Structure formats: C-alpha cells, structure tokens
C-alpha cells in the first residue's frame, strides 16, 4: 500500500522513469515493426503463391501436355479437387500504345494463356482485376474515342455546322482533360440527337453499361473480340499514390483499356529452335494487381487459344512424312501447365500425392486410337508440385531471414534489461537514504524489494503498452511513412528550419543570462531541427529516397499487418526483462544496512 | 536482567569494519531506561552515542558476543526479523538530526507513513493531522519537506515518530541542525511530551541540553564514564 504511494510519487516527480518508459517503448515498437513486416512479407509471398497458382501445379515445359482437357475432367471428378485449369505459358513482346509517337515502346512480358472462367475458380483472378467500372474521366475518354472512331458516320449524319461544333468540343475537351476534368459527357449528350447519342453508347458497351468493364476482364474479351488483361505495372501510365491506390497519368489519358497492343511470341520446335515469330493485335480489356511486383510488372493474361496458336500448341493434323496427303490422326491442343485447386481443408501435400495418383490413372485411360500420348508419369520433364514447392526459392530464404531477424532483435530485450538495470542502479543509489528511513520506521526487506519491482513493472507495462501502440501505428502506416520519407513535403523542411531559427534566437536570448543548460538544450534543438530541414532538402534534391524497392522485395506495398502473436510475446518479454533488470538493484536496496543508508549523502 | 526497566542495553559491544581495519565503537556499555524517564546520552563526536541509540532502537545489531538489548524484558535481537520490524514500527519512534523526511511525500503523508506499514491505517490520517496541528503544522499538511523551515521539518519528523504511539522516543541530536532558538522550541516540544509520560532517550554533545533529563549518561570512547541522576526535569 505505501509502496504504491511511493512508486506513484517516484514515477511522477522525476524525468528518469519517463526516459525509461520511452526507451522501452522504442525497443518494443522496433521489434514489433520489424517482425510484423517480415511475417507479413512471408505471408504475402506464401498467400500470393497460393492465390496465383492454386494448390498443385502439373507442368511439362514448352512441349505441353496433350489431352489436357481429358486430364482436367478426370481430376475434377475427384471429391478432393475443387477445380483445375490449363495454362499455356511463354515469353512475348508487347508493344504498348505509348508514347504519342510513331516509335512505340515495347515490354517483355510473361504471357499466360488462360481459360478465364476455370482460371478464376482456381486462383483469385477475379479479385485481382483492377478496374470494376470506368471513372468519370475514363468514361469521357471512352466517349471521345467512340466519337473519333465514328467520325465518318457522324459527319454524314450531322449538318456541317454541328459536326464542326462537335469536333471542336472533342478537341477542346481532350486537350483540357489532360489537366483537369471537363463536362464533355454532359455537353455531348445535350448536343447530339438521341439517335446518334444511343449509337455512340452502343458502339462501346462500357459506355452504356459500366459494369461491362469488369466482365470484359473476367472473360478476356470485348464486343466478341479476344482481349489482354495486363499486370498493373506493365504499363507506365499507372502511378502509385500515397494512399496506396493507383492513378493513371494525365487524367486517365494513358488508361490502358482505351488502347490495343501487339503481342509477339516465338514458337519453338522440338529441338528448341525458333520458328517464325507470330503476332496478334488485341485490345486491352482490363488490368490486374496481384500485389507481387515481379508478376504485376511482367505478366499478361490472354485467352488460352491465342497462346496456343502463337506458340503452335494448338490442335494440328499429323501427316505421313513420306506421303503428306495421308493424315495419320490429330495432335491435340496442349497446355504447358495444369493448375489444381483442392477443396477447402485439403492439405497441399496430400493433394499433390492425389494428383500424382490421378495422373497415372489418366494415362491408363487414354483412348486406344490416340497417336499422340501425354508424358509418362516417370518422365523427368513432368513435375507435379505444390505451390509451396514451386515458391520454395522465394519462401525458403525469407523464412530464414525472419528467424535471423527474430534472433538478432532478441538482443533488444537484453538492451531493455541493461537499460532498466542501469536506471534502477542509479535510482537505488539516489534513494539509499529513503531506504534507510523506511527501514528505521519498520519497513521489511521484502517490502523494499517490492517498491522497486513495482516501479519497474509500471515502467515495463507503460513502456511496452506505449511501444505496442507505436508499433501498431507505424506498421499500419508504414507505407505512408515510407512515402513521406521517400519524398518529404517541402513544408516539412521549411517548418523544421523555422523551428531551428526560433531555437537559435531563443538560445541567444538565454545565453545572455549565462546558464549552460538552456544553451545546451537550445543548441541541440537547433541542430536537430536544422539537420532535419537540411536532410529533407537534400532528399528532395536527389529526387527522393526509395527504401522499399518493389523490384527487390517482390511486392509493391510494404506488408502492414501487425503480427499479434509475436507482438504479445514482445510485450511480455519486455515486461519480464524490465523486472529482471530491476531485481538486482531491488535486492541490493533491501540489503542496504539502514544505519549506513541513513548516513548516505 | 531487571524488569523495572522499559528498555535496557546490557554490555553492548559494537565494532565496525573500515576496510580491513576493525574499529571498536562500543565496548561493553550498559544502560537501563525506566518507563517515563528522560535519559540523555552525552558524549563528544565518535564516542559511540549514536551507535548506542541505533542498537537500542533495533536499527543496528550488536556484535555476536556484544550483549543484548531488552525491551520490556525481552531480547530484541533474538526475535524474528518480522518482530524486529514491528519493534521499530510500533514501540520505537526515531527522530534524527537531519529530519529524514521523504522528499517526494507531503508532510501529512510522511507522518502517516509508519501507520501504512503496520496496517494500522484506520484513523491514521486523523491521528497524524491532530499531531501536526498540535505541533503548529496544520497549515503545512500538503507541503513538501523542502518547503518547510528546519524547525518545521523537525516537528514533522517528531509527529511521524509519534504517530504509532510508541513507548520510547529516540532522538539523535534533534537540535544539531537548528539555530538556538528553534532548537529550544524543539526541546520544549520533547519536554512537553515527556511531561505527558513519554519515555525519551536523547543523544547530544551539548551539555546545556543534557540538563533537561532525569538521567545523564556520559559516554566516552565507547564506554559509560559515569551516570548522573538529576533530581527533577526542567
């Protein structure tokens, strides 16, 4: 009881406990942020692998697996398997619509030919699509595009004067829209006769029904034409905002679903030699964001039949080489991989064994008349892996790295203990006379120990609670903080420099009185704020800092989920180490000879 | 052993270690204090008078063969630690030269503190307030010790020593840090308490102060030189 009174007074009447609380809080926050980011990173690697690839992957290089549709049917009959989908994978060159020049930019892309409907059942393809409905600006651009595409028709339908007016409207609007929003939609709708307006709306189904945008992405087609869904970072038009959302530069001018792209792929023969390159021009129908930077910057999805055709993996006739007129049979279309998703609660490793077993069964059930056989189950080129095994080269090192970080940062606990030890050592020294007084009025040794343990417990609990809040806040806002650190606002620099100037003036004013502490504090404040201001200016001068480089860490955002189990363990550890740090000085205090303690100066 | 004494020190010996050197402070000093007596232990610096007081108050332990302290006929140092703590808390009240108030607590809290140690807290605040008011500190209850004058601090320390209604008040140079007038004021407070029946053992080097008690014990080089009984306390 009296210990509580004393602890409260000791805590509130000195600066040392506040410093200790701050130090514990910083240590705890540091561990929480580091472990949370590492765990989040690992989870992201793992879950992205799972959501992008399904549970089990059957692959057979560039030759592909024939009769894959039979294999899929066979697999889907099993009750453990939810769905399976074929992939035809290869590298290609994609010509982008930008810049506004004859010479366009090309990107190397990893092309996945997919069957969109079954692909969405196996992966989270539908959730990853970026554009659900066009924004007002995007709708305006689509309208401008529709007018441009239909200009001959409109010129015929409209009186000369009206056409000129419409053309002027469109020109002005597209020029202005590069900088600000305009009301072209409303203006054109009011100006055009309803018949022509409806004609324009029906020209692009996204104009009349905005929801078609998402649907087009899901089906990889627009108005019955095959389309491309590309990764969000493939296009240079997409710019990440501070809040983590994306915006298309020049007010949606470079919004990819307005344009077409040319996809070129190289089919390869059995010997690995390149046959004639094949190209196809296709509209972009949507973009996707998986969160894995490496995928988002290079992958595009197209319908599977496109890649089969471009890579010569589509159905072909097998002819007799000696007599080309004799058709021996059919070489069926092929898929380079089959992605399999298990039912919920089916373990990936069990599923892999199941798929292996089913594959053998599938081989036994190939019809007799077939002349082209799928790879045998003992073919070394055939791999059947879980998503984890497929991702092992990523997840393995990350897991090791996290454990290393955990071990390294456990040292922080020792820092906390050493800190508390030194603080309490000095507190006990300072309070020696109080201990003597308490002993002289009958306080027991145990109760003296308890004063200091209670004191450290309060510091530990307050510090780690504060650290938990701080760690939670930093982890949640880590992307914003990263953004601000990378590109600090100029106001920050001016603010800091202004504070530095105020500090300097105050220090000069105080210096006249001759006291040293205000001068030291003022100078430190001046140096700190001046330094921050100068640093901000320097960072801005060199064009900003990128600490989390998406191309290095795979993900475009820093994981910001708090790892609660580790955080709670960290808080518990910090409190425990605070107690450990205080227990020796507390015992020393209890054993102090009261007579000597009373003489302590 | 003589049961007419309230507090008794028999053949007290105490040696301190100064580095590796043994420094004998008391060698075989005996003293008996009757209930209601005022005993003054007089001696120069280093004579062992404070040590004597500490031994009697259960704050310091005599050497292994260094005699014993008896309180109401019972050996203090043969009891358990808990009992010794209780002895210091309940039966003895200490007043020191340098007041020894806890700087973080208010005057009232300092005074109440001993009652919080023995859970005798019911009515403790009232008792402490009454004591402080009696010592003219009613207007200082919520002040910190540093805001008080020396005399006020010593009066607060006396109030703390008395709050558990001890049988003996042990005062170690209670006026040593005060000017003459304030010192006299403090002595008047003690005299008053003594007149009301409190047993007082006072340690001083000041011969003038010694005149106030019933009995003067002269201590020199750790031994009792002579004891004088005064006819009447003033």
Image: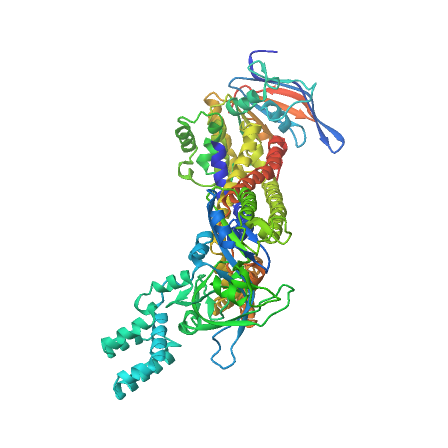
Residue A187 lies in quadrant: bottom left
Is residue A512 visible to us here?
no
Q: Position of residue A538 (x, y in %)?
A: 56, 70
Instruction: Using the image as rendered, state which of residue A16 and residue A434 is in the foreground.
Output: A16
- Identify whether B149 is placed above or below B223: below
- Identify whether A483 is placed above or below B190: below
Residue at the far right: name it: B20
Numbered circles on residues, count: 0
Dividing the image into 4 quarters, which one contains the C terminus of chain A? top right
Is residue B187 visible to us here?
yes
Query: Residue drawn 68% across and 26% down?
Result: B220
Q: Position of residue B232 (x, y in %)?
A: 52, 20
Q: Is residue B145 left or right of residue B13?
A: left
Q: Position of residue B61 (x, y in %)?
A: 64, 24
Instruction: Using the image as rendered, state which of residue B155 and residue A256 is in the foreground.
Output: A256
Query: Residue drawn 53% across and 58% down?
Result: A335
- Identify whether A582 is placed above or below A300: above
Q: Is residue A545 left or right of residue B136?
A: right
- Identify whether A484 is placed above or below A417: below
Instruction: Using the image as rendered, state which of residue B191 and residue A232 is in the foreground.
Output: A232
Query: Residue drawn 33% across and 75% down?
Result: A182
Instruction: Using the image as rendered, state which of residue A120 and residue A426 is in the foreground.
Output: A120
Q: Is residue A531 left or right of residue B160?
A: right
Q: Position of residue A36 (x, y in %)?
A: 53, 49
Q: Give the colour scheme shown.
A: rainbow
């Amino acid at each position: 009881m009296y210990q509580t009174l004393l602890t409260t007074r000791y805590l509130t009447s000195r600066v040392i406990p506040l410093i200790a609380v701050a130090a514990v809080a910083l240590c705890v926050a540091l561990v929480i942020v580091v472990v949370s980011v590492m765990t989040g990173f690992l989870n992201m690697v793992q879950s992205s692998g799972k959501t992008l690839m399904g549970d089990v992957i059957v692959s057979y290089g560039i030759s592909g697996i024939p009769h894959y549709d039979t294999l899929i049917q066979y697999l889907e009959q099993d009750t453990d398997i939810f769905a399976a989908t074929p992939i035809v994978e290869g590298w290609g060159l994609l010509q982008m619509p930008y810049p506004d020049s004859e010479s366009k930019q090309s990107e190397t892309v990893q092309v996945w030919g997919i069957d969109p409907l079954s692909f969405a059942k196996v992966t989270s393809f539908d959730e990853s699509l970026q554009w659900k409905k066009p924004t007002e600006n995007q709708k305006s651009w689509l309208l401008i595009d529709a007018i441009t595409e239909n200009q001959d028709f409109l010129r015929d339908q409209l009186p000369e004067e009206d056409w000129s007016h419409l053309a002027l409207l469109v020109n002005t609007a597209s020029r202005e829209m590069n900088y600000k929003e305009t009301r072209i939609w409303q203006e054109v709708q009011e100006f055009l006769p309803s018949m022509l307006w409806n004609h324009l709306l029906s020209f692009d189904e996204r104009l009349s029904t905005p929801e078609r945008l998402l649907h087009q992405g899901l089906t990889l087609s627009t108005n019955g034409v095959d389309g491309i869904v590309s990764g969000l970072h493939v296009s240079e038009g997409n710019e990440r905002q501070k809040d983590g959302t994306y915006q298309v530069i020049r007010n949606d001018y470079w919004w990819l679903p307005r344009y077409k792209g040319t996809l070129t792929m190289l089919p390869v023969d059995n010997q690995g030699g390149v046959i004639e390159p094949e190209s196809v021009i296709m509209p972009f129908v949507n973009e996707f964001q998986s969160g894995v930077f490496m995928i988002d910057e290079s992958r595009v999805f197209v319908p599977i039949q496109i890649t089969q055709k471009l890579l010569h993996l589509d159905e072909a006739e097998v002819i007799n080489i000696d007599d080309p007129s004799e058709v021996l049979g059919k070489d069926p279309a092929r898929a380079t991989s089959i992605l399999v998703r298990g039912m919920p609660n089916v373990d990936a490793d069990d599923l892999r064994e199941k798929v292996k077993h089913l594959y053998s069964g599938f081989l036994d059930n190939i019809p007799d008349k077939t002349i082209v056989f799928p790879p045998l189950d003992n073919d070394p080129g055939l791999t059947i892996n879980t998503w984890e095994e497929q991702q092992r080269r990523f997840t393995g090192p990350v897991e090791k790295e996290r454990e290393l970080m955990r071990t390294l940062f456990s040292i922080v606990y020792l820092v906390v203990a050493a800190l508390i030890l030194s603080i309490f050592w000095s507190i006990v020294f300072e309070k020696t006379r109080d201990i003597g007084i308490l002993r002289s009025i009958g306080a027991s040794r145990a109760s003296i120990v308890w004063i200091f343990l209670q004191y450290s417990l309060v510091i530990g609990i307050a510090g780690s609670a504060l650290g938990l809040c701080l760690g939670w806040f930093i982890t949640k806002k880590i992307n914003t903080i990263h953004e601000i650190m990378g590109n600090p606002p100029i106001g920050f620099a001016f603010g800091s420099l202004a504070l530095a100037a105020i500090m300097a003036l105050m220090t000069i004013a105080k210096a006249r009185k001759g006291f040293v502490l205000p001068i030291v504090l003022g100078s430190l404040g001046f140096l700190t704020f001046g330094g921050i201001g100068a640093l901000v200016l320097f960072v801005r001068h060199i064009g900003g800092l990128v600490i989390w480089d998406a191309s290095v860490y795979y993900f475009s955002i820093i994981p910001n989920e708090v790892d609660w189990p580790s955080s709670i363990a960290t808080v518990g550890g910090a409190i425990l180490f605070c107690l450990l740090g205080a227990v020796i000085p507390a015992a020393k205090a209890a054993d102090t000879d009261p007579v000597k303690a009373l003489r302590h100066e | 052993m003589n049961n007419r004494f309230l507090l008794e020190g028999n053949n007290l010996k105490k040696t301190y270690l100064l580095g590796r050197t043994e420094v004998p402070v008391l060698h075989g000093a005996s003293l008996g204090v009757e209930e209601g007596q005022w005993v003054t232990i007089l001696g120069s610096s280093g004579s062992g008078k404070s040590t004597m007081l500490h031994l009697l108050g259960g704050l310091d332990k005599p050497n292994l063969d260094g005699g014993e302290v008896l309180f109401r006929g019972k050996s203090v140092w043969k009891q358990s630690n808990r009992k010794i703590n209780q002895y210091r808390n309940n039966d003895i009240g200490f007043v020191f030269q340098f007041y020894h108030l806890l700087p973080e607590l208010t005057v009232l809290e300092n005074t109440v503190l001993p009652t919080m140690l023995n859970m005798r807290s019911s009515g403790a605040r009232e008792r402490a307030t009454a004591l402080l008011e009696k010592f003219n500190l009613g207007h200082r209850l919520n002040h910190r010790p540093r805001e008080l004058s020396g005399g006020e601090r010593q009066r607060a320390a006396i109030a703390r020593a008395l709050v558990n209604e001890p049988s003996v008040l042990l005062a170690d140079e209670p006026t040593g840090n005060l000017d003459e007038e304030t010192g006299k004021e403090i002595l008047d407070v003690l005299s008053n308490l003594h007149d009301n029946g409190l047993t007082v053992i006072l340690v001083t080097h000041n011969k003038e102060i010694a005149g106030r008690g019933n009995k003067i014990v002269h201590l020199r080089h750790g031994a009792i030189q002579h004891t004088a009984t005064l006819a009447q306390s003033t």
